[in-house]
Image (cartoon, rainbow, N blue to C red):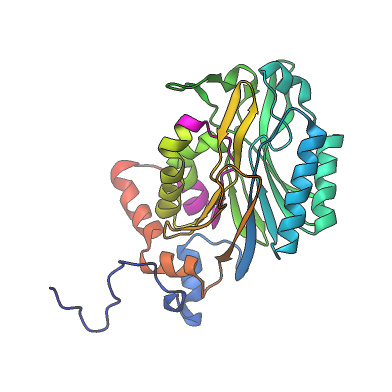
């Protein structure tokens, strides 16, 4: 066994203790090395899971119960899944259900945030698109006053013939977004993504290392086949490689005769450990966790002990010249 050198930190075989985070004198340097982000200390958040249907009023009532539960648990933010407001049984129904962000449906969710004093991550809202044949799949962040704080339109569209599953061609009725988005919140600096974006690590690296995201929001409606094979391993991989918290809200169960979702909403910490999940992976409800985002927390400890951002910047000249 190789003897540990005097004065050197122990090997990284377990999550670094938050007590091993940078001392106050080094906090500013550590924050700069990590790409910035909001210094909000420790904050409790909730990840939501539900089985949306084709009735917008019913879905709003379910989301209201989840918001009430999150507020009662002392959470600063609730993360809801993709298609939280509507899941129909045909693309034509989704087109017909679309509304502008200034319309009455989003106004109802803004009131929900205001009523419960919660920030809401509303992932996958059917927003009126650029032409009558296309909508946007839009991730909206609403603050605790009911104001829209950020809007991200899903970039990567799910055009896949799932083995032993459905043929889904999202681009037939959805237009892609063109901009990556981060937003500062009481739950840290959020990097916004939606569902299929999870398979594109370049987007997550950009949000974390170039835009300073501390928490990566991944609202989803994974199919049962792809979820069983890839859901948790991809989420944990994004958390590990970005050294960030990942909050992955999920649709679960059977929505209609044509569609079923995997569920398993989870929160993953920057070491890749799952720190919150529902006891029933198909139930409607929330799971909560404390995110340690301050200079003395787990995020700073992980990034300080293994400075991937600096190493990435130094190495990119070899494989991404000019980037």
Does the image show residue 14? yes
Measuring from the top left, give residue 124's x and y in whole percent: 66, 36
74 relative to 285, above or below: below
Which residue is most to the left?
1
Q: Nearer the viewer, residue 6 or 284?
A: 284
Q: Residue at x 38, y 53 (%)?
A: 313
256 relative to 196, above or below: above
Q: Nearer the viewer, residue 269 or 202?
A: 269
22 vs 67, left or right, is left
**Picture quadrant of residue 94:** top right
Q: Residue at x 45, y 53 (%)?
A: 239
88 relative to 122, above or below: above
**Picture quadrant of residue 290:** bottom right
Tell me where the magenta segment starts and ends, as one range: 205-225
Q: Residue at x 14, y 74 (%)?
A: 2
Measuring from the top left, give residue 117's x and y in whole percent: 80, 59
Measuring from the top left, give residue 197's x and y in whole percent: 52, 36
Q: Nearer the viewer, residue 233 or 306?
A: 233
Quadrant, the N terminus:
bottom left
**Picture quadrant of residue 9:** bottom left
Measuring from the top left, give residue 295's x and y in whole percent: 52, 73
**Residue 98 magenta:** no
Quadrant, the C terminus:
top left
Q: Residue at x 77, y 55 (%)?
A: 68
Q: Nearer the viewer, residue 49 or 237?
A: 49
Does the image show residue 102? no
Number of numbered discs: 0
146 vs 21, left or right, is right
């Amino acid at each position: 066994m190789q003897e540990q050198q005097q004065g050197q930190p122990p090997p990284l075989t377990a999550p670094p203790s938050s007590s091993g985070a940078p001392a106050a004198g080094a906090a500013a340097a550590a924050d700069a090395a990590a790409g910035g982000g909001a210094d909000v200390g420790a904050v409790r958040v909730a990840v939501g899971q539900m089985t949306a249907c084709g009735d917008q009023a019913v879905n709003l009532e379910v989301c209201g119960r989840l918001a009430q539960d999150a507020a009662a648990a002392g959470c600063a933010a609730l993360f809801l899944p993709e298609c939280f407001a509507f899941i129909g049984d045909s693309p034509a129904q989704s087109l017909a259900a679309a509304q502008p962000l200034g319309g009455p449906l989003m106004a109802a969710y803004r009131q929900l945030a205001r009523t419960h004093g919660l920030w809401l991550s509303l992932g996958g809202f059917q927003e009126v698109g650029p032409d009558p044949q296309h909508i946007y799949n839009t991730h909206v962040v609403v603050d605790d006053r009911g104001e829209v704080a950020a809007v991200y339109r899903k970039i990567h569209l799910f055009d896949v013939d799932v083995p032993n599953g459905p043929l889904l061609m999202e681009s037939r009725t959805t237009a892609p977004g063109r901009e990556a988005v981060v937003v500062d919140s009481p739950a840290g600096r959020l990097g916004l993504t939606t569902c299929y974006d999870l398979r594109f690590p370049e987007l997550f690296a950009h949000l974390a290392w170039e835009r300073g995201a501390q928490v990566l929001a991944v609202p989803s409606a994974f199919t049962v086949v792809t979820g069983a094979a890839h859901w948790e391993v991809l989420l944990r991989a994004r958390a590990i490689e970005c050294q960030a918290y990942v909050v992955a809200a999920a649709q679960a169960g059977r929505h209609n005769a044509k569609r079923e979702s995997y569920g398993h909403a989870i929160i993953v910490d920057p070491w890749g450990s799952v720190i919150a999940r529902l006891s029933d992976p198909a139930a409607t409800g929330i799971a909560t966790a404390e995110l340690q985002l301050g200079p003395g927390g787990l995020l700073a400890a992980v990034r300080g002990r293994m400075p991937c951002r600096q190493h990435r910047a130094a190495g990119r000249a070899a494989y991404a010249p000019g980037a």
